Amino acid sequence: MVLQESISTAIDSIRANLLRSLLTTIAIVIGTASVIAMVGIGSSAQRAIDDSITNLSARTLSVYPSRGRGSQKISAAPLSISDADALIKDQEINWRVSPEIRGSKSLKYKNESISISVIGARESYLSIQGYEIDQGAFFTERDDLARKRVAIIGSSVGTELKTSSKALVGEEVDLGGVTFKIIGVAKSEGSSGWSNPDEQIYIPLLTASDRVFGRDRVDSIRVEVPNTYTPEEAMISIERVLRREHDIGPGEENNFRINDWSQFTDLQKQATAIFSALLIGIAGISLMVGGIGVMNIMLVSVTERTREIGLRKALGATHQAILLQFIIEAVTLCIIGGIIGVIFGSSLYFLVTVFQDWVFTIPFSAILGSVIFSACVGLFFGIWPARKAAQLEPAVALRYE
Amino acid sequence: MNVIQVKDLTKHYSLGTQTVEALRGVSFGIEQGEFIAIMGPSGSGKSTLMNIIGCLDSPTDGTYHLNNQEVSTLEGDELAGIRNKEIGFVFQNFHLLARNSALDNVMLPLKYAGVDKEGQLKRAKNALSQVGLESRMDHQPSELSGGQQQRVAIARALVNNPSILFADEPTGNLDSQTGHDVMQLFHNLHQQGQTIILITHENEVAAEAQRTIFIKDGLIESDIRKEKL
Ligand SMILES: Nc1ncnc2c1ncn2[C@@H]1O[C@H](COP(=O)(O)OP(=O)(O)OP(=O)(O)O)[C@@H](O)[C@H]1O
Ligand SMILES: [Mg+2]
């Protein structure tokens, strides 16, 4: 009997028990839906990460002093403002350099006092960080050179001082015993995980160095590199300048370290990969469960249709014809489940892309792959019931009540 | 030449420790074009005999020649091929596929015979018109009366031009009027030269046949030929 005939017989009998058939395929539906949603969400998330690397992270390098890790060769050599100046003077790459002095001080206004994270920085800090000013203005290069006592506060500092940030503009505050004038408020940025820019206060670098912290050691130097250079090229240049500044001879180790943010995103990539591997595993298990469900329902179907099988054999159906009929029925059931799963999975994924503002891209290979895999599940779990059907003795099957 | 020649057929069923001897040595021959009724009390072995000469089952012992071919030693797909080409079955409870139209039901043996779609349609329509149901070919069994369903089953049995038509109590589920119509159909088929073997309990049904074989306890009790008028 031709294949087409078996397929239409299979579809007929699935339709005859439509509800039961659809319930049977639920696990298959869940399995394929999660594969499709995972592959889609995974690839969109990857794309979003890639985009953020090219947007920001990969172009911004941070230089830190080496932590004394017991290696005696590395003398404790802090990063200083002059290191930053040397980087600025170096013209090989037209990077932007932003040294930072950080520390914690108490901030007093009227009768309120809080502990606050202070950032002493250059006037370029704001744009390198991608922050914006809400009220007033950021300090200028002249403010910095004149070591002026002016400050910009994060948007939620005002409320911590029992007033509003807006009301503080133009007011004088006491920062670690030094009187500062608030000249601006930064727009709210939200917490970035390890620090919250909204709860910080920004002052000119030289003011921080001379009047507040009394040191010209900086905590970090951010270097923003134009897109035309790779992070590796930028690293080599930074190394060259700083090794010269720190008098490091050939063969000696760096006494500073350069963070490339792409290392961080590599980790993130790894985490996503592990996450999706886990979910694919779960999807695999649910496909197996689905297969067993299909096998169960096929066994029920074979029993219910014993007389039909007997009749078909009486009319001349061969072993193979019956085998094929029931295998195709199981495979068709699983393919239908797979297709419903693809539809559910891509709808779910579509919703996620809408909420996350991601690009919707499902690789066609994923769709084809998961439907083919469902078909294989049907084939594998359909063989046993189909063999049972094909092995029925016609005379016995016809008498079955 | 005999279409069917059986000799010393026995069939034993073993049920655990017990053995049921359904047939205990049956021998007879059937000629081309004969119309035979098999009668006997319930449990005497009629259906068992039909299963064996209908190639649905193999005998425990004895020989069976169908069209001069020894078939008692064949199995599986070889028997399926013989059932498909040489034998047409009509059952007491019709055995139609409930979700298929009358036409599809009649086409089924042709599908297993590997006949092309066009040939299937032509021959199935032809068989349906032979039983007077051409106008009902798109109806499903549930939309047909019992007599009509049995006629569809007869069309299905005839569609592959079998050497023998077997009917196991074909009127058992029908009222007397419809039963009579169905017997008329068998009568006409016999007139056209069809070999027919029919199992029945009813004397009026058996009266249509030329020859009646009585079976009792797995043995032939009598084999009576009516004189031709
Ligand atoms: N598959 C089987 N397994 C065991 N015993 C069987 C089987 N088929 C038939 N028998 C037994 O063989 C004997 C003959 O059965 P068979 O069905 O041939 O009788 P029958 O003459 O057709 O009866 P009825 O007129 O009631 O249809 C019975 O005793 C029956 O119980
Ligand atoms: Mg019987």
Image (cartoon, rainbow, N blue to C red):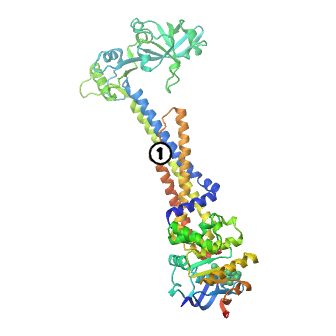
User: Dot 1 lies on which element?
Assistant: helix
Pick the quarter of the image with the C terminus of chain A: bottom right
Residue under the point 51% across and 76% down: B81
The residue under label 1 is which amino acid type?
Ala
Is residue A387 visible in the rendered image? The answer is no
The percent position of residue A323, horizontal first and vertical second, equals 52, 67
Residue under the point 50% across and 60% down: A380
Residue under the point 51% across and 88% down: B68
Closer-to-camera residue (A116/A190) = A190
The percent position of residue B92, horizontal first and vertical second, equals 68, 76
- Which residue is identified by label 1? A277
Closer-to-camera residue (A200/A42) = A42
Q: Quadrant of residue A255?
A: top left
Check the image and report above or below for A67 versus B57: above
Left or right position of A292 against A400: left
Q: Chain of mark 1?
A: A
Residue under the point 37% across and 22% down: A224
Closer-to-camera residue (A147/A328) = A328
Q: Ligand 1 quadrant?
A: bottom right
